[in-house]
Every structure is written in C-alpha cells, then in structure tokens.
Image (cartoon, rainbow, N blue to C red):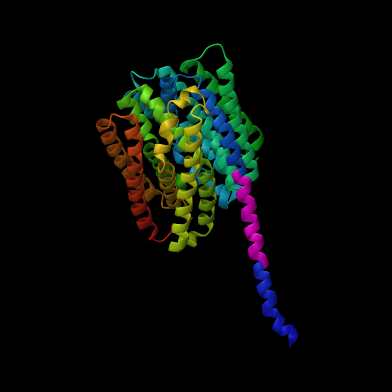
C-alpha cells in the first residue's frame, strides 16, 4: 500500500526534474547565445568609435546610409532561400547540405536582380551625393560578403549550436573592428579608402565563417525540393526587404532631404540605438525557434504582454544609461560623436518601440505566415515614409526632429501591434 501511494509522488518529482532539466538547458543556451551578443556589442562599439571619429560626420552619414541600403538589398540574395535553410537546420538538420547547395544555386541566379535593384536604389537616393564606386563597394561587401556570414550564424543557431554561433559572431565583429582601427591609423582617410578596408574585413569574416564554422555536409542538388519552397522563400525575401526598408528608410530620407551632415548626425544616434538592440535580438531569435516547435507558446495574453513589456523596459533602460553617460561625458565616444551626444537621450522611447516592431515581425515568421508578414511590413514601410517625410519637411531644429521620432515610432508600433496580433488569431501554418 505504501509503495502504491508513493507512485504519484515519484511521478511528480520526475516531472519536476524533467522541467528543471529543460529550463537549465534553455538558460544555458540563452547564456551561450547572449555571450555572442555581448561580444558583438563590445566590438561593435569599438568599430563605431573608430569609424565615426575617423570619417567626417558627412562621410559617416554617407557610409551608414549606403550600408543600410546594402543590408536591405542583401535580402534579395538567393530570393530569400536563407529562410528555408534556417528551417531545415532547426527541424531537419540532415538536409543542410542539400539546402546549402540550393542557396548557392539560387544565389548565383539572383545576382542580376540584385544588380538591377542596387542601381535603382542608387539613382533614387544616392546619385549626386555618394559616388557610384563607393556605393557599389559597400553593397558588394554587405550583400555578397557579410550576408553569407550571417547564413553561417543562422545555420548554427538553427542547429542549437549557440556557443559556436556566439564565437563566430564575436570573431566576425572583431574583424570589422580591426578593419576600422587599421583604417584609423592609415595615412589616408576618406570614404573611398574606407570602402576597401570594409571589403577586406568582410572578406576575412567570410573565409572564417565557411572555413571553420559551417557544418560539413555533402552538397547535393535537389531541384524539386527547392521549387516547393521557393514561393515561401520569395515571400520571406520580400518581407525582409520591406522590413529593412521600414527599419532603415529613415536614413535614406534624411540623406535625400537633409543632406550628408544631418544624415551623419542621425546615423550616429540610430547606431547607438542599434547597439542597445543586440541582446534583444538574441532573445527574439531563441523565442522564434521555440515557436517553430510549439506554435501555441504565445496563446496567453499575460505571456505576450509580459514579453513586450520586458523588451521595451530593457531597451529603454539601455538607452537611458547611455544618455546619462554622454550627458556627463560628451566626449566619451569621441570628438565627432560628441556633436550628437546631447540628442541621444531625446530618442528615449525609440529603441523599445523599434525593437517591438522587429519582434512582432519575427512572430509571424515563426508561425509560417510569411505572406502576411510581407504585407504588414509593406504597410509599415509606407506609413514610416509618410510620417518621416512630414517630420523632415516641417521641423528644422535637429533636437525637435529627434524628439518627434518618439511619436513616429509609437504610431508605427501601434500599427504593427494591430496588424500582427490580428494575423496571429488565425491558425498557424504547418512548418
């Protein structure tokens, strides 16, 4: 009788033990991933300080804007097939070699589209401001050198090898920082010279990523598998382009309407905002993986609101801390950055709201609602363009312009929340 009564108790302890083991694994994975984010944060800051204080503010604005355009255009590479590669690494890792071959094939086929789109973006936003040779070099570095490095990171994260991905992230970012430091001590300074250093740093990162960190599997072409996933990949590519358009469109507009110097000031502020987002992106990446395996994860309102509140609070506190440091020590990040230092704290709500828009877009990707995600991001990009055009053409004071960004991003967040959670009420797509 005693043994029989002990059975439920033993089962309870077994369930508790299993739950604790799962949580320990999750915490270990998170700290492995966040260590990479921490390393990237340190080297990204070193990279930013070296570059922002070597180039003039106007040249830094030109580079930052061209780089943002390159990041956006890089999403056209392989027609978005990186998403299929990520899902494969997460769910069916034995097919990584097959899908890597598909990525390489589609990457080559997508090059004419990438060239045409790049030239179109240059004519619309950069002609007369940035030399074509500089723009071409920066887009080449972002789309054909750095984007494949991100593929290696994505595949390792999909496999659950967060520590390995963290090491790669740290080393690749360190190589970029090293390139900026070498440029800083070089005898010639200027955006054209920097573009060559930038190509070299990204090329070294690419060799490192695929020479030591990419999983070794035999490459096998299976066209029928790629064709079945191509439509979904194109949706993802479109969504990614639209995501980065709505994310980076402000830099393009500031350059086109306000000129290179204002673009440089704005780029410094938004780069500091970006640095606060690095740990949040790590959290979002791991949550997306959990949702791929368990789509019902965010079915409870308390969990959804708790996550969003945490993302906003952490992001806001990070920028507030940075703003306080720059208030008392305006030269802490260098002479050029000191011109923008008094403006940083004025964008206090921007990191949290921006990170929430990005997080909500990732929720739709996790649920397989790629077409809805693309449509939502297109609407957000159009709304952001309208709001920023109004702000840039009606507000002349730089401080007032930065302050108004809080309202712009609040309206974008509210629109994103309405679109995202309306879509999430529908049944999840089978992955």
Point out residue 99 in the picture as x, y percentages from the top left corner: 55, 43
The picture quadrant where one finds residue 233 is top left
Q: Is residue 73 magenta?
A: no
Q: Please give the name of the residue rendered at 39% of the width and 57% of the height, measured from the top-left corner.
A: 424
Q: Nearer the viewer, residue 29 or 411?
A: 411
User: As displayed, is residue 139 above or below residue 82?
Assistant: above
Task: Check the image and name the residue furthest to the front.
Answer: 328
Q: Is residue 23 magenta?
A: yes
Q: Please give the name of the residue rendered at 40% of the width and 17% of the height, measured from the top-left corner.
A: 131
Our reading of the magenta stretch's main secondary structure is helix
Can residue 72 be seen in the rendering of this structure? no
User: Is residue 290 toward the left or the right of residue 227 in the image?
Assistant: right
Q: Please give the name of the residue rendered at 34% of the width and 30% of the height, measured from the top-left corner.
A: 398
Point out residue 87 in the picture as x, y percentages from the top left corner: 53, 49
Task: Check the image and name the residue furthest to the top.
Answer: 187
User: As displayed, is residue 389 above or below residue 293?
Assistant: above
Q: Nearer the viewer, residue 341 or 378?
A: 341
Magenta residues span 17-34
User: Is residue 333 toward the left or the right of residue 13 in the image?
Assistant: left
Q: Please give the name of the residue rendered at 52% of the width and 53% of the height, measured from the top-left corner.
A: 287
Point out residue 45 in the picture as x, y percentages from the top left corner: 55, 32
Point out residue 257 in the picture as x, y percentages from the top left corner: 30, 26
Can residue 385 be seen in the rendering of this structure? yes
User: As displayed, is residue 380 above or below residue 23?
Assistant: above
């Amino acid at each position: 009788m005693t043994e029989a009564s002990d059975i439920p108790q033993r089962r309870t302890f077994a369930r508790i033990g299993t739950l604790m083991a799962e949580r320990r694994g999750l915490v270990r994975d998170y700290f492995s991933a966040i260590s990479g984010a921490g390393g990237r944060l340190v080297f990204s800051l070193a990279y930013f300080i070296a570059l922002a204080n070597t180039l003039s503010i106007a040249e830094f604005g030109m580079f930052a804007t061209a780089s943002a355009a390159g990041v956006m255009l890089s999403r056209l590479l392989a027609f978005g097939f990186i998403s299929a590669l990520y899902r494969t690494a997460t769910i069916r890792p034995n097919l990584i070699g097959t899908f890597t071959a598909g990525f390489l094939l589609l990457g080559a086929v997508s090059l004419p589209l990438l060239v045409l789109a790049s030239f179109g973006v240059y004519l619309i936003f950069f002609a007369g401001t940035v030399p074509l040779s500089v723009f071409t070099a920066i887009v080449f570095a972002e789309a054909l050198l750095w984007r494949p490095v991100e593929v290696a990171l994505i595949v390792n994260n999909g496999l659950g090898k967060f520590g390995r991905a963290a090491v790669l992230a740290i080393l690749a970012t360190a190589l970029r920082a090293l390139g900026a430091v070498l440029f800083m001590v070089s005898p010639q300074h200027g955006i054209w010279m920097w573009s060559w250093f930038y190509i070299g740093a990204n090329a070294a990162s690419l060799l490192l990523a695929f020479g030591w960190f990419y999983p070794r599997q035999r490459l096998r072409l299976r066209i029928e598998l790629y064709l079945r996933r191509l439509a979904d990949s194109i949706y993802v590519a479109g969504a990614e382009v639209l995501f980065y358009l709505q994310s980076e469109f402000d830099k393009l507009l500031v350059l086109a309407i306000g000129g290179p110097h204002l673009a440089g000031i704005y780029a410094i502020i938004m780069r500091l905002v970006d640095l606060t987002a690095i740990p949040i992106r790590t959290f979002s990446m791991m949550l997306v993986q959990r949702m791929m395996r368990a789509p019902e994860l965010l079915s409870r309102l308390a969990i959804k609101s708790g996550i969003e509140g945490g993302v906003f609070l952490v992001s806001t506190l990070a920028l507030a801390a940075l703003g306080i440091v720059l208030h008392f020590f305006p030269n802490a990040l260098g002479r050029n950055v000191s011109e923008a230092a008094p403006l940083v704290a004025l964008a206090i709500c921007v990191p949290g709201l921006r990170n929430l828009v990005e997080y909500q877009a990732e929720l739709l990707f996790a649920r397989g609602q790629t077409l809805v995600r693309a449509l939502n991001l297109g609407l957000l990009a159009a709304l952001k363009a309208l709001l920023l055009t109004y702000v840039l053409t009606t507000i002349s004071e730089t401080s007032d312009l930065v302050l108004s960004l809080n309202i712009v991003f609040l309206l974008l967040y509210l629109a994103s929340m309405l679109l995202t959670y309306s879509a999430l009420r529908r049944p999840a797509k089978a992955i």
